[in-house]
Image (cartoon, rainbow, N blue to C red):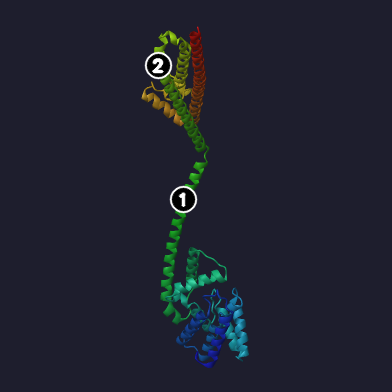
Amino acid sequence: MLENEFFKEVEVFVFNLLKNELPTQAIYHNFEHTLQVVKITNEIALAENISEEETKIILLAAWFHDTGFTKNVNNHEKASKEIAKKYLTEKGIEEEIIKQVLLCIDATKIPQNPTSKLEEIICDADLHHLGSLDFREKSNLLRSEWEQLCNRYLTDVEWLKENNEFFGAHKYFTNYAFNKLNAQKTANWLKSQKDLKKMIAKNEEIEFKTKIKKDELKRKKEKDNRPERGIETLYRVTLRNHLKLSDIADTKANILLSVSAIILSIALSILFPKLDKADNYYLIYPTILFLFIAVVTMIFSILSTRPKVTSGIFTKEDIENRKVNLLFFGNFHKMPLEDFQAGMTELMSDRDYLYKSLMKDLYFLGIVLEKKYRLLRIAYNIFMIGIIASVITFIIAFQLMKQAGIEAVLN
């Protein structure tokens, strides 16, 4: 029947209609799908031994059942009936046949609920892909069509759940479709259920890993935002800077000590042997001043670096009253290890005590630094002024010696 002239004209009409007016996003409900439905419809009709007139009705319904996608995607069955009615009326088809064709088209609407043999045939033909080997390919095409044409986006899990629900609600109505397609449909359903379980397990694993990662980031962020971290950084940087300043002060003091010692040794080895001569009496005062400046400078340099000796002992009352700073070695160097460990345990268990100890350490280190730099500044000032004064004194002495020599010659 499909080879007669009438159905060839119908095929050409449907082909041109879908070619020219079907949206390009309709990659499942296209002419290929229509052609397959027509062939399966004819196959089922032959197997079910329906009459020639009934076969004609059902084939016409198969050709026109998805033509409505060219007009209205959301209610394409209604549009398909309008297109079919107009075409068949123009071709002079009997009104009763047209009515049956429209009923068959309307029966393909999901969920399917056929009320006659013809409606059962076209329903089975329309969803024959559920029991085909290429079900997954067809399913992917339908999903892509939903996304592009209907803006309906589903996750992989949602899509598989949709498929499983559809499989569970669907059944083949005709004996031929049930015998031929139902076994493969069951296999496809089981495969879909297996894929869904895998996908759910995979998503749960991803969600678990994501949750762990988020929790780690949250803990890290909370840790970074804790005031304690900023306080610890403050103490660490400040103490390091103070220790560097202390090292710089000690280095400067050592330089001054070395220079003063060299000057003192030169004075003692070169100038002092010459003072026992009567002609060199003019060098006595400059030399004494020179040596005095060197000695005083050394004294202040030593004072700036001299360590302070402390008792090195603390009592339990000091710990209880939070009066001792266990972070400074001078407070515990004479204590037994057990007492020191007990004191440190108490210190680490009390955050306020710990921070106060750090404050004390920082404060007294600042006091020491102030003393160091004050004494060092005095030493440098004495050295600078003394060197200048010594040089001036030597110059004056040489001038007096020169004048005395001239007067002796004249006399």
Q: Which residue is mark 2?
A: 270
Question: For mark 1, does the 10 Å Cα neighbourhood hold few (<14), some (14 to 19), or many (20 or more) residues?
Answer: few
Task: Kindly identify the amino acid type of the residue bearing the numbered disc 1.
Answer: Lys
Q: Residue furthest front?
A: 410
Can you give x and y, in whole percent of width and height, for residue 373 in the image? 50, 24
Which of the two discs, 2 and 1, labels the residue nearer the N terminus? 1
Can you give x and y, in whole percent of width and height, for residue 367 in the image? 51, 23
Q: Secondary structure at mark 2?
A: helix
The mark closer to the camera, 2 or 1, is 2
Can you give x and y, in whole percent of width and height, for residue 283 in the image? 46, 12
Q: Residue furthest left?
A: 337
Q: Which residue is mark 1?
A: 213
Q: Which of 142/46 is in front?
A: 142
Q: Looking at the image, is 396 positioned above or below residue 123?
A: above
Q: Which of 353/271 is in front?
A: 271
**Is residue 313 visible to the viewer in this orientation of the structure?**
no
Q: Secondary structure at mark 1?
A: helix
Question: For mark 2, does the 10 Å Cα neighbourhood hold few (<14), some (14 to 19), or many (20 or more) residues?
Answer: few
Q: Which of 54/197 is in front?
A: 197
Identify the image quadrant of residue 333: top left
Q: Number of numbered discs present? A: 2
Q: Which of 76/411 is in front?
A: 411
Can you give x and y, in whole percent of width and height, for residue 6 in the image? 55, 91
